[in-house]
Amino acid sequence: SARKQPRALPGGGDLGPNVIVFDPSTPGIQARLDQVFRQQESAQFGTGRYALLFKPGTYNGLNAQLGFYTSIAGLGLSPDDTTINGDVTVDAGWFNGNATQNFWRSAENLALVPVNGTNRWAVAQAAPFRRMHVRGGLNLAPNGYGWASGGYIADSRIEGQVGPYSQQQWYTRDSAIGGWLNGVWNMVFSGVQGAPAQSFPNPPYTTLDTTPVSREKPFLYLQGSEYRVFLPEKRTNARGVTWGNGTPRGTSLPLSQFYVARPGVSAATLNQALEQGLHLLITPGIYRLDQPIRVNRANTVVLGLGYATLIPDNGATAVRVADVDGVRLAGFLVDAGPVNSATLVEVGPQGSSRDHSANPTTVQDVFVRIGGAGAGKATTSMVINSRHTIIDHTWVWRADHGEGVGWETNRADYGVVVNGDDVLATGLFVEHFNKYDVQWFGQRGRTIFFQNEKAYDAPNQAAVQNGSVKGYAAYRVGDAVTSHEGWGLGSYCYYNVDPSIVQHHGFAAPVRSGVRFHNLLVVSLGGNGQYERVINDTGSPTSGTSTVPSTVVSFP
């Protein structure tokens, strides 16, 4: 007998218990925010996931403190539709004033009027600040100005000054700011009105007038009482915010065209929804996958809320995208499973060659973690095969602390591998891989801002020996590449198991006129390991125990 077709899955529906929606008349908003914060403040590897959504209107006297895996967002079409007379705060009291582990939290699509004139946003990696309007200043340091290692701002207007203070590095894209106070090692701006002038290495500002190509992240909003997802349009040579002058440019989809996924759903059901022509809205929680989520249709949206987390079992890949136009992957975390996966996220199959310049695939706030929440392994975390893909803010992290951490325990040789041509990365954070953190084999690739730490836990020099070369570069451009460009790239070493390890260079590339780098740095943290050079055989060694960058302004 003919196989019965599975019953069609419905679109739309309830966003589930971990999406908490407020309107200005909701009683007890502050108490509910405080309750979530108490639960999430130090739950770095916990299972709680929350999205705090605010309907359009004005909210008075709130201080939304954000802990781990917590996203806050307005539900208007513009940030100015949802105003909080108060603050959205990230600080580091839970970690004795050290903000370097304030990962996995986000703020989007809100206007803030900070109580004392300045909002504190002391975050580290994987903590985007998107589409925000701060009617005042923004302080990126923790109370007490302890260590901080962030961060990312896009499509935001900060009317006052941004004060990074102790922040080691930061990338700001397509925004408008009232001023920028200082820089520690690597501050990069593209398409930012009010950005400081190019001055690397002193102060360490890398400033591009525009961003070559950008397309803002999809976002959930309310039209009347109906949830919709807005899809901002692509911009070329972008500068400044996308909102503020009437309706933003782009298209919109009703929630009825999305399968609203809740924790416990199977990969087979997610794939059935995609085959049916639905998009995916993945609500906060943990999702175990025994097969990849397969995105085969052009223009498909896969949008996670509240750091929805995908864990592949049995060595599966978590997400596989076909070589099609206009896919949007956004807002989720992929956590490697205990059985080694060859790859975790793949955009396009091997050998992809179609031209997607008119309608690229975007990978935005898609984060990858190997270990930390438990043993995990993956040979390569993220592979980009499709041409013209835009990686807009990712943190790909082989964990250096937490559970299931060790040189072989959470083995992961490669972070990001780019095989496709014409790929652009804006805000690339890749850290601690056993071999190369980034390998770029495609032609005409471009990276604006790169942050890296080499693996802390290498047991000895032999463990990182790369043929005759000491150590694997953080960022390697393939030997056959004839055209590549990078701006504002930094690599740090902290070999705390064997501080005598020597890393020959942070960057490796063929010496050709078409392969160009601007504003590179390497730094040894307190002398735990040393770099002999910055790129290839160029640049001064880092010296002694002084945590002072060695820089190369232009290569070749």
Image (tube, grey):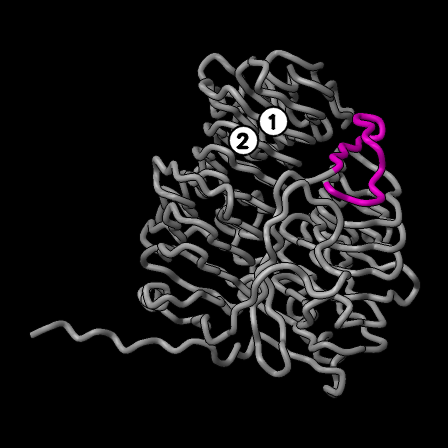
Magenta-tinted stretch: 191-209
* Label 1 residue SS: strand
Report if the CB atoms under discs 2 and 1 are less than 8 Å apart: yes
What residue is rendered at 57% in x and 43% in y? 400
Q: Nearer the viewer, residue 293 or 529?
A: 293
* Neighbour tally class for label 1: few under 14, some 14-19, many 20 plus, Cα within 10 Å: some
* Label 2 residue SS: strand
What residue is rendered at 78% in x and 43% in y? 167
User: Residue 378's x, y, as percent?
Assistant: 41, 43
Query: 474 left or right of 178?
Result: left
Residue assigned mark 2: 445
Query: 26 left or right of 18?
Result: right
User: Residue 23's x, y, as percent?
Assistant: 71, 82
What residue is rendered at 67% in x and 40% in y? 237
Residue assigned mark 1: 485
User: Residue 367's x, y, as percent?
Assistant: 54, 51
Amino acid under label 1? Answer: Glu
Amino acid under label 2? Answer: Gly
Residue 8: image quadrant is bottom left
Q: Quadrant of the N terminus?
A: bottom left
